[in-house]
Amino acid sequence: MPKIITLIGRPNVGKSSLFNRLTGRRRALVWNRPGVTRDLLRGNWTLDHGHKVELWDLAGWGKEGLSFANLREQKSAQVDLYLWVLDGSEPLNDEDLACLRKARKTSKPIIAVVNKADKRKAFEVHAHEIFSHLDEKDIVFLSAETKAGLGELIENVERVLGLTEDAEDPT
């Protein structure tokens, strides 16, 4: 059975764009308006060394999103890793942190994916906030639009899931 990776985060941080980029298909709707993703979307992602994982795209967390309700319906115990997607052009906010707290309650590993890293300048002022919540090795800066940083994301996913020689125990 393939490992399951779930994209989480508040609305409009780029989860669906990242889902489309990683799966190589344009299945998730992408629109600059919150609430477009309403249902759990599943796709396949093949990592560098031929490892196949199942990728889940959830609706955004927070007052405009559906929180983790649809994840509970899909048996959250199956999830092996969360990719906590953040908007690199904005500072962290309460919705981002509430999403992180909810994911931490599951005791599953979390990698912070700072999307829109091409607009990183505005974000760098607030980067210390993320570093105070997660280990530096579990933070990846990327751009789903330009593919910059995807290699680092894949390396971190393989490391955390134990799919490489230098993997760590995810528990």
Image (cartoon, helix red, strand yellow):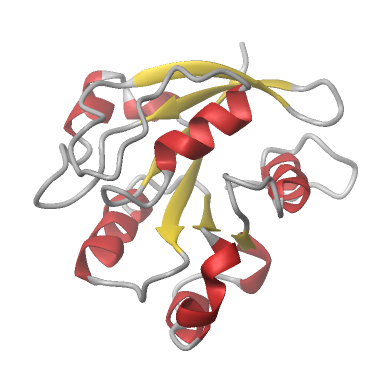
Can you see residue 6? Answer: yes
Q: Position of residue 59 (x, y in %)?
A: 26, 34
User: Compared with residue 112, is residue 119 higher up or lower down, i.e. above or below?
Assistant: below
Q: Position of residue 24 (x, y in %)?
A: 63, 22
User: Compared with residue 6, is residue 146 higher up or lower down, i.e. above or below?
Assistant: below
Q: In this view, does 33 lie to the left or right of 142?
A: left
User: Compared with residue 162, is residue 128 higher up or lower down, i.e. above or below?
Assistant: below
User: Compared with residue 136, is residue 28 higher up or lower down, i.e. above or below?
Assistant: above
Q: Is residue 135 left or right of residue 26?
A: right
| Residue 32 figure quarter | top left
Residue farthest to the top, as pictured:
1
User: Could you say which is closer to the camera, residue 61 or residue 116?
Assistant: 116
The quarter of the rendered structure image containing the N terminus is: top right
Q: Position of residue 72 (x, y in %)?
A: 23, 27
- Residue at 35% x, 45% y is 106
Q: Is residue 165 left or right of residue 38?
A: right
User: Could you say which is closer to the camera, residue 110 or residue 140?
Assistant: 140
Q: Position of residue 58 (x, y in %)?
A: 32, 32
| Residue 52 figure quarter | top right
- Residue at 47% x, 77% y is 123
- Residue at 65% x, 47% y is 146
